[in-house]
Each structure stands twice: as C-alpha cells, then as structure tokens.
Image: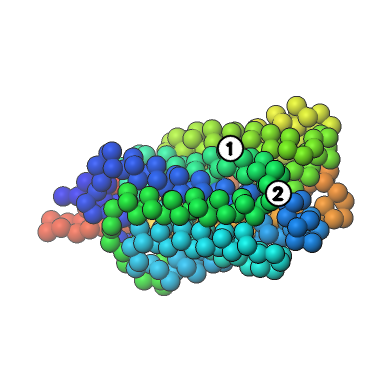
Amino acid sequence: MRGTGDVELTGGARAFAPPPAGARSSRALAVLGLSAFVVGTAEFVVIGVLDRMAGSLHVSAGTAGLLVTAYALGVCLGGPLLTTATLRVPRRLLLCAALAVYAAANVVASLADGFAVVFGVRAVAGAAHGLFVGVASATAAGLVPAERKGRAVAVVFGGIAVANLLGVPLATFAGHALPWQYVFAAIAVLAGVALLLVRAVLPLEGPGGRVILGAQVRHVVRAPVLVLLATAVLLFCGQFTVFTQLSGYVQESAGVQGGAVSVYLLVFGAAGAVGTAVGGYLADRAAAATVTVAAVVLVLVLTALFLAGERPVAVGACVAVWGFAGFGFAPALQLRTIRRAGPGGDLAATLGASAGNAGIAAGAAVAGGLTAAYGFSVLPVAGAAVCLLALPLTWLSRTGPKAAPAPREHSGRGGTERPGSLTASP
C-alpha cells in the first residue's frame, strides 16, 4: 500500500520511494525554494544593471536588453530539449547537474569582456534554468498530498519571487557600487552552495519518468494544454514588455535616478513574494479562477501605471499591485498545465516554464523595439494590450475538455488510481 507521498507524475513513474516523512519533505521543499532563489536572482539581475553592462560591453541599452531575450530563449528552447533527453535520469542528479551548469555559466559571464560571450552564456544558463524549474516543480508536487500540491509548487516560484524581493535589489545595488562582474561571480558561488544542499537533502530517487518521449508528447500536444501554454506566453510577454525596461521607465516617468531604482524593484519583489504565497493557496482551491482574475488585474494595473505619469508614489503603488498579480497566477497556471497533460506531466512541467520564458523573450524584444522608436512611456500601454489578449484564453481553458485520465495501478481485484496523482481534476 503506497502512501500519499508516492505520487505518479508520468504514467508509472514515482517521484520518491519511499515517501519522505513530513520533516524531511519540508527540508527538501526549503532547499528547492532556496535553489530557485539563486536561479531567479541570476535571471532578473540583468534588468537592474543594464546601463552598467551596456557601457562596459560597448553596446546600447536596447542591445543590452537582448541579454534578457537570450536567457529566455535558452529556457524555452533548451529546457524542453534537455528534459526530453533526460527523462530517465534521477531527478536529484538532474537538479545538481542544472545547478552545476548554472554556476559555470555565471563564472564565464563574470570573466567575459565581450557582448557575444555574455549573450551565449546567458542562453546556456537559461537552458539550465528551464530544466531546473520543470524538474523542481514536479519534484515539489511529488513531496506532498494532493490537496497541498499548489502550495508545494508555489515554494519553487516563491524562491523566484523572493529573488525579486531580496536578490535582485541587492544585486542591483552591488552592481552600481562595484563592477557588475562581481555580481555574476557571487551568483556562481550561491549556485554551488545550492548544489551541495540539493545533494545532501533530497533523497536519491528512481528515474524521473518512464513514459517514452512519444507518449509524453501526445499528452502535451492537446488543446487544453496548448491553451494554457499560450496563456503563459501572453501574460509573461505583456509583463516583460514593461519589466525589461522598468528601470528606464521609472527614471523617465517618475524622475527616479541611480540606486533609488532598486526601491521599485524591491517593492515589486515584496509584492511578488506575497502574491506567490497567496497564489499557491488559491491554486489548491480555485486554480482556474486565480489565473483569470490575475489576468484582469494585470490589464488594469498596467494601464494605471501609464496613467500614473510623473507621480512616484502612484507608480510605486502600481508596481506593488502588478508584482502581486504577476507572481500570484504562476503556481496555479503551472499546476493546471501539469494536470491537464496527465501522464505527460514531466514534459509539461518544463514546457510551462518554457512558455513563460518565451513570453519573456518576446516581451524583452518588444520592449527594445518600442523603446528605440517611441521611448519608455508607451511600454505600459503595450503590456496591457498583450495581457488583454490572454483573457479569452483564460476563459477557454476553464471550459475546455478535462485532462487525459491518469494510468491506474491494477491489483488482483481491479484498478485503483494512485493517491496524490497530479492528474486530478484541475
């Protein structure tokens, strides 16, 4: 008889055997959250030091913004490729390998003196990020009973949110006080520490999945899953049309200069951390409604950010609401994507992160083009318009067909579905 900790993720694969005790599970979740904090800090730190990097690498601010695009493209292309190539590799080994690549990429970035090299290693780090977030999300969900999976996934996204609360503002401050290369060197050290903790705390489990690639793809390439992935692309694209150039926007619109920009990043991160925690709680109760409401809020608050004009306090309030909603929907959307994919959950977990980063890449590219042509002031309106396009999809995903049924484990007296399956009704 299997306990609730023995979770089927991909048609016969077990996340952990035997299921960890409560205290061990909590420690493992904490380590996953800490590792996500390191990954999230490295992902977004470029935004706070774009001006310093542009000057050092002898490129324009718009060109430097392509470093965000490179990272995001690494996630959305490299992440799924690495996942499909490693479906039978134990999850703890995958997480350690991803963090090792992450550390190495940031070491190279700290030593590089040319834009092309930094661009390349950012793409490599993004691929490792995509693999890490997908595996970490599935692993976190496998540590807890069915009624707490949303909150477990929120721990991973919470680590990224706290990176915006603490890691990115601190790194931004350090990047203005010291050479920006020191920031990437410090992130490499933190990635090494996270690797050691993952190796020490997470149990050595079996392979991450036993469903062959073709079967996983068949479960992922279904209308309900594709609608959710498209929703992620649009919502993240809309946000990063603004967030990529947020430092430039607050300097131009609110008259904020230098290190004071980090205050707005701190507000965004604090609101995002709270939003992730609340969003994980809501994901376990009304995941579909959480995504829809968050999309509506994003449209409204980005419009309000445009109208806030030169009022620094009003801009800060808009950034706070934006951070809350922008991070709040992520656990619900990721959990719904995994569930709707049924036995293709392992691949879907990575594709959920990839879809978000495809949106980030598109948003960064749009931000660069709009900034070059029209300046920073038009960005919130453009971001709101993109988020508006996602609203019909959020409703369609609520009314579409349910997930494919999860495989059942048969006993001598009939089939019984394993407790805690991620393919439970969304």
**Can residue 151 be seen by looking at this rendering?**
yes
In x, y percent, where is residue 290? 53, 38
**Can residue 8 be seen by looking at this rendering?**
no
Above or below for 199 versus 25:
below
N-terminal of the pair, mark 2 or mark 1, is 2
The structure residue drawn at horizontal position 31% and vertical position 43%, both measured from the top left corner, is 25
| Amino acid tagged 2 | Val
In x, y percent, where is residue 421? 32, 50
| Amino acid tagged 1 | Leu
Label 2 close to label 1 by CB (< 8 Å): no
The structure residue drawn at horizontal position 19% and vertical position 59%, both measured from the top left corner, is 410
Measure the C-alpha gap from mark 2 to mark 1: 16 Å
In x, y percent, where is residue 319? 69, 35
User: Which class describes the residues within 10 Å of circle 2: few (<14), some (14-19), or many (20+)?
Assistant: many
Point out the residue furthest to the top here: 313
Q: Which residue is mark 1?
A: 165
The structure residue drawn at horizontal position 37% and vertical position 39%, both measured from the top left corner, is 148
Q: Which residue is mark 2?
A: 49
Q: Toward which corner of the image does residue 106 lie, by quadrant?
A: bottom right
In the picture, the disc for residue 60 is none
Secondary structure under the numbered disc 2 in the rendered image: loop
User: Which class describes the residues within 10 Å of circle 1: few (<14), some (14-19), or many (20+)?
Assistant: many
Q: Toward which corner of the image does residue 253 lie, by quadrant?
A: top right
